[in-house]
Image (cartoon, rainbow, N blue to C red):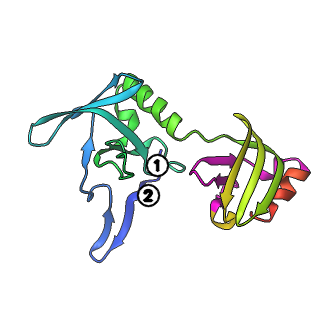
Amino acid sequence: MADAQLTKVAAPDGEKDLFEHRISLDLTPENAVFTPSAGSLISLTLTQPSGEVEFFERVVPVRAFPISSPEEFISIREPDTRLGGRGDELGMIRRLSDFPPETVKMIDTELSRRYFTPSISKIHSFSEKFGYCYWDVTTSAGRIEFIMTNPSSSIRTLEDGRVFMYDIDGNCFTIEDPTKLDKTSYKKVEIYL
């Protein structure tokens, strides 16, 4: 569950809740009905505040806080365009658990695909060439090789000790507890922690 302070900011006239002051529509079970569509995609039937009903053949859930609040503040967007433009936000789910179990399962499945984050258990090799870092690692999804630019901005250590690493394609890998890596693996990543 999200920290209640997550959306609070200071304002001249006191505290302001960003969730309550956002422009997008608050999606609830009363105004948003999600259904499966062809190809394991998600469709949305949305009732606007005006009473107008709109159907969206495909929508994409995106977590606003993927690490700290993965089941809250889920943006529902139209798909990105082929020219690289980001799809428009249709609304925001405050708490996924407010929806029926079949909706939760459908959205969770899509989010799991989108936020697939293999956990690194061993670092076989690491090298730097021409400004790129090349990693060969064993993860919960098997052995993977990936490329990273600028490790100082592509590797993040959280307060709880978990490490997140992002490759040049935006894929994310985690090290749940770097101190539990074997000695050789730890030495390869230690400088960036």
**Vertical order, 25 against 149 (above or below):** above
Q: Residue at x 34, y 23 (%)?
A: 37
Q: Nearer the viewer, residue 176 or 54?
A: 54
In the image, 24: left or right of 41?
A: left
In the image, 192: left or right of 43?
A: right
Characterize the local packing of mark 2: few (<14), some (14-19) or many (20 or more) Cα atoms within 10 angstroms: few
Q: Which residue is drawn at 50% across and 48% down?
A: 66
Which residue in the protein does label 1 denote?
A: 2
Q: Which residue in the rendered view is the most extreme toward the bottom?
A: 12
- Alpha carbon of mark 2 to alpha carbon of mark 1: how far? 7 Å
Q: Residue at x 33, y 36 (%)?
A: 59
> How many marks do you count on the picture?
2
In the image, 101: left or right of 163?
A: left
| Residue type indicated by callout 2 | Leu
In the rendered image, residue 69, in percent from the top left (x then y), is placed at: 49, 47
Is 120 magenta? The answer is no
Q: Which of 45 and 28 is in front in this view?
A: 45
Q: Nearer the viewer, residue 50 or 169?
A: 169
Is 164 magenta? The answer is yes
| Residue type indicated by callout 1 | Ala
In the rendered image, residue 60, in percent from the top left (x then y), is placed at: 38, 39
Which residue in the protein does label 2 denote?
A: 6
Let me know if residue 162 appears in the view. no
Read off the magenta span.
154-183
SS of the residue at dot 2?
A: helix
Characterize the local packing of mark 1: few (<14), some (14-19) or many (20 or more) Cα atoms within 10 angstroms: some
In the rendered image, residue 115, in percent from the top left (x then y), is placed at: 53, 41
Let me know if residue 186 appears in the view. yes
Q: Which residue in the rendered view is the most extreme toward the right?
A: 183
Marks 1 and 2: in contact by CB < 8 Å? yes
In the image, 179: left or right of 120?
A: right
Q: In which quarter of the image is the C terminus?
A: bottom right
